[in-house]
Amino acid sequence: MQFCFTVLCKLLGMGIFMYKKISTPLSDSIVEELQAGDRVLITGRIYAARDAAHKRMCDALARGEALPVELTDEVIYYAGPCPPKPGYVTGPFGPTTSGRMDRYTPAMLAIGLRGMIGKGERSKEVVEAMKKSKAIYFAAIGGAGALIAAKIKKMKVAAYEDLGAEALAELWVEDFPVIVATDCYGVSLYETEPKKYKDKYTELQNLR
Amino acid sequence: MREICCELITETVNKLFMEANYHLSEDIRNKLLEYRAMELSETGCEILDQIIENAELASVKELPICQDTGMCVVFIELGQEVSIIGDHLTEAVNKGVRQAYDEGYFRKSVINDPLKRINTGDNTPAVIHYDIVAGDKIHIKVMPKGFGSENMSAIKMLKPADGLEGVIDFVVDTVSRAGSNPCPPIIVGVGIGGTMEKAAILSKKALFRKLGSKHKEEFYEVLEKTLLDRINNLGIGPQGLGGITTALGVNIEVFPTHFAGLPVAVNITCHASRHKEAII
């Protein structure tokens, strides 16, 4: 039975987990319902921005200027793609290390950013700011950029075109697969999960 | 003297970067499958499946495995009986990089200055390490090096009294601090000895060795295994979301050093460890 279920899910390309489907922009009720560990498929508009675009946005906020896009309840994907081969919407487009954006994130959350997609854990300051503004952090799989690109249906540069692969981009995604890594209650898989597997490698080697 | 045209060097560098960015090496794929069969974490298994599927898709469609097509690292072992005809050797290599990153639709991630930060637009310059060796051939090794993992690398000048335990602790601590950031499962290159810069270069060179191949010295073969056990016991797992698959391998390179020192460098690469080589 378990085998049939696994096969069925494999055929559907879903792995063995149940996926929750959500649409952007996010709201209190969507974010409150999601918990660390949930598998989620995101559909709708998201923005892609990495180090250089974040620096420009934060510099603009510090000068009291408006941002080129409205970020209230929106989701930012920390990523910069390869150029598209002919016939493709985009080249491979996997997540980059989120920790590098930690310095900019509290300011982004303060203006209403609701969700972030990236890879790797966030600082304590970011998690605290997320709890305060009810925001959520999703993990995508780093190094699976070719697979992820297939979920991006449209893409256009929204601002800072001169930054090339680091430009702020607007993406339309369909069933974009992520895992809730840190929920709006501050529970983080990067804290809870590794503990469970400490010293298990040696135990496993001894059994073999 | 054997004459080699710079065009052949450019063409070889171009081809090697294309292959490296599209096709994951067999040894890494095999290790991923081996750890997938062992992994205890369901999330870990799900992630490893997607990593393997991604590599297959990239290879079939000739797409980059990862969007971070890296900064180009090139090791050149130049036979001293070779005479290069045409361009300057460094320019021939950079030309190969320029062509590959244009024709291959790879991301151009290199900036002109670490503080002024303007994109060079063609992913050059490459970081090139030259070695003059005996013979009349050129051995070219290339590595498009992603920076998620490069950023998590570290070097330390240990004291001789720190000894073997000190080395082990520094390597394991570096991987532990890197945690989820370098896209685990990772491969760990360790350079021990020489001077500060020599240790760093050795740690990069170590990443070229095939996974699963044994160190030529038994002492270091045992040390590699000890380090791998300690690292995989950390529990970090695929993408840092828990599991036993934190590293697929640890490769060590050593060099004589000064009696007052014990330099150790740790260079980390992600599971999309891309490197190819050719002899012309």
Image (cartoon, helix red, strand yellow):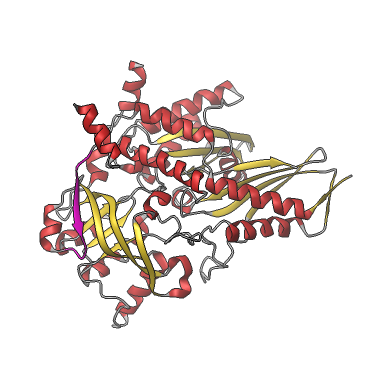
Magenta segment:
A17-26
- Frontmost residue, A178 versus B178: A178
Q: Is residue A183 magenta?
A: no
Q: Residue A116: x percent and y percent?
A: 27, 59
Picture quarter with the C terminus of chain B: top right
Q: In the rendered image of this protein, does residue B215 appear above or below residue A16? A: above
Does the magenta portion include A25? Answer: yes
Residue at 35% across, 59% down: A152
In the displayed structure image, the side of residue A133 where residue B27 appears, left or right = right
- Return the x and y of residue B201 as percentages of the image width and height: 60, 45
Q: Is residue A37 left or right of residue B213?
A: left
Q: Residue B179 versus residue A173: which sits nearer the camera?
A: A173
- Residue at the image position 25 percent from the left and 56 percent from the top: A42
Residue A87 in percent (x, y) is at: 47, 60
Asked if residue A139 lies left or right of residue B88, the reply is: left
Q: Nearer the viewer, residue A87 or A155?
A: A87
Report the side of A96 relative to A199 (left or right): right
- Quarter containing the N terminus of chain B: top right
